[in-house]
Amino acid sequence: MGLASFFRNLITSGKNFEDNDPEKMEMTIRYVLLNSMIFVGCILLVLFGIQSFRAQVYLQGIIDFSMAAITLVGFVLLRTSASFLWASGLTVISFMGLCGFLVYTGGVQNSGVLWAYAFPLLSIFLLGIRFGSILTSIFGLFLGAVVLIPGFSPQTYERAFAFRSIGVYLLVTLCTVVYEVTKMHKDKRLLQLTASLRAERDQIAAMKDNLQEALFLLDPAGIIQDQYSPILETMLGKTNLTGTAFLDLLSGSLTSKERDLLKDFFTMVIEQRFDPAMLEEINPLKEFTYLVPGVSKEKTLSATCSRLQREEGRVFLLCTLRDLTREVELRKQIEEEERKRQQEMRALFEVVHVEPRIFEDFIQELDSQFTTINTALKDTNQDNQNILVTIYQSVHAIKANAVILGLSDFSEKLHQLEGEIKRIQDKRLPDFQDMLHLTLEIEKIYRERDTFQELLERIRSFSKSSGQLQEEQVLIQTLERTIERLSRDLGKHANLSVKKLDSVALSQLDFRLLKEVLVQLVRNALVHGIESPEERQQKGKPPAGTIFLHLEQQGSHWCCIVGDDGKGLCFDRIRERAQHLGISLSPEKERQQLLQCIFSPGFSTQDDADLHGGRGVGLSLVRDRIQKAGGTIKVSTDEGRGCKFYLYLPLQQKDSMAAG
Amino acid sequence: MEKYIKPFVDASVGVFSSMVGLSVTVGRPYLCEINSPHEWDISGVIGLTGQARGAVVLSMKKDLALSITTALTEKAQQEINEDVVDAVGELINIIAGNAKKGLESDFKLVISLPTIVEGPKHRIAWPLEQTRIICIPFTTGDGNEFWLSVALESQQGA
């Protein structure tokens, strides 16, 4: 290797030219030719010189040696940065001198003239057509003089020889010129062609490199070919993709079934089984989720493939890959906004149907429940589990009201929140993360409340006319709505019958508390007490059940009775449920214990929780509220004929609430 | 949202124990009216923008600020002065820096350098329209408290 590169260096004068540049390539050839000439010439001249000295022709010997020396100067010149013309000129002129000398003297057997024929070739090739032609002409004239003018040289004059010599010289010159001109012309064409090709290539490369879509070729085996867009690496989050199977890159993002589908699709594209529109239709990569390797990041990409046939008959898949992540993100955002807007519209419609006075009442109650929730959250003396019970009750109460008002979206959200609380409750020790999550969820509900508030204000501004409803009417309307909504959902029929509603009681009792408790009891009656119309008819009852309400003063208490003509408490079911929950029952006090059970949180005889009941919150909430207000509850039940709840609240109850 | 808040909580606990040498317990988060009165004496406001927009504010009373300064500068201070503001600022800066590590790599979020606000019962003007903020109380080993208040709005549909 060392020897080869040394030789290469020697012959090209250490000049390094790019291999793919035709212009430089020619320069290399010129260097190689000149150097070889210098070497051959130098060696020959030295040999001639030695021979001349041995033949004791000293003058010729000296000329030979000096010529050799001059060519060596050319060799050195070639290696410097001096123009090629200087070194080549030196060599050509010294060669010209040598040839002139040989022509003049005639040489061995008159062969000196033969050297002359090499001259046009060398001079024109090395010096180019202009300088080369001048030197060739000068030498031609000299040759003519030598052979034509008798006595000019020591040779004998022979006309035939003279004309032949000049003829051949002219022929060689002509051929060289023609060759050189043709070559120059060809070079020029080549140069133009190369330039235009290069410009084209640069344009295509620029397009490929700057396109937001990645372009790449796959061979029939699905291997990525080397000329792919650089952006492909960014998209796939991987470098050096040449030689990688495209399917392997996607393996993390596709199921094996999808992979098989994709393989079939590639085959279909290659075999052109269907028209392009059809293929595009069934393209499994039209939009797919790509898992970027190494980082937990998802991208939405879109790939298209088409068949590409190269001239050698080889078939490739021309694929484009587009990053749709941002588009999809935006689309989702728009969808989400649309959903939100629709929801707001729905909420608006739902709200419009509600009497503003009742709606305001709802918001006020919401606020008071939120206060309860937030107070509980702030209370550092209570542990998480206790607080969760409080929050659950409040959320449940809000939900009950939302259902009455027919705010279905909002109720659904509260129902989900209940589920979320339940999930956290089921963990023995809820941690900070859980509570943070819960707080954020509650905050979301809070925001809904703000929306409602805004809606209410807007509605208010439309309908100033409808006068204020009295509390009595609010209460009755609320309960009637509760029954109406619930019975529709449950497929039952029931009416509210108000026997007596003491207006003094209404003004003295905490109205919100009373309403909340009554709503829960009415719900309870309807869900658990009143039977379906068919069942009622079988029992000989009217198909529509009755829920009655009675509120009056009894001694030092307000007594409120909520009753129904339904099936009454089913002790068997309660017992079964209690045993299931592992509550121990003593036979003598069983009835009382079972009644206690129905008021405890989380106790429900219904198996599935839905919007209306089944999570065992309603009655526990009633007990909580009544106990806090210093009241008591009694239950009387008659199996098959109905159940009554007696609530006893102290007179002046409003004050005690305010104090609490 | 939790994913944006958690790094700040973790960073607060970590930095307090490593820099100040105080063990810190996180209390139960609750909601706060935006203008509800409080007893803060010094706060660091860290702005967020990108995927989520808003601010995270770490606030404390004078006592804790002074003991932090003592722990960091080894020089006892009696009143809130420039040294105290510097020390608390540095601490909050480190907390923001630690939280930033987790947030900027996983989410498209940019976190600002904290701004320190000082003064008895100062009020924060929150950059969002919402009326409530999430308040996370912390209790230090020596019985002091500080709060992380968060008001963030997700910029994306998700």
Image (cartoon, rainbow, N blue to C red):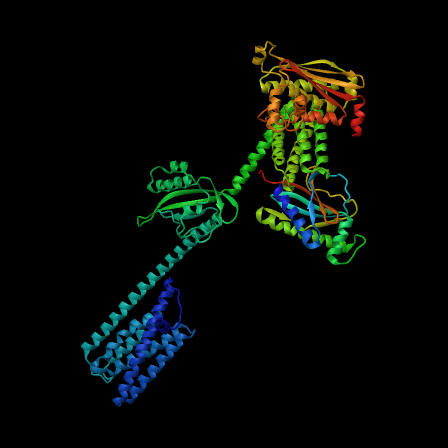
> How many numbered marks appear?
0
Q: Is residue A54 left or right of residue A524?
A: left
Q: Nearer the viewer, residue B21 or B68?
A: B21
x, y (%) of residue A365? 71, 27
x, y (%) of residue B129? 68, 38
- Residue pictured at 75% horizontal, 39% vertical: B35
Which quadrant of the figure contains the N terminus of chain A? Answer: bottom left
Q: Is residue B96 left or right of residue A263?
A: right
Q: Quadrant of residue A596?
A: top right
Q: Nearer the viewer, residue B66 or A525?
A: A525
Which quadrant of the figure contains the C terminus of chain A? Answer: top right
x, y (%) of residue A459? 68, 25
Vertical arrangement, residue A467 with respect to residue A435, above or below? above
The residue positioned farthest toward the top in the image shown: A540
Vertical arrangement, residue A557 with respect to residue A328, above or below? above
The residue positioned farthest toward the bottom in the image shown: A56
Vertical arrangement, residue A246 with respect to residue A162, above or below? above
Q: Is residue A416 left or right of residue A131?
A: right
The answer to whether residue B150 is visible is yes
Q: Nearer the viewer, residue A580 or A282?
A: A580
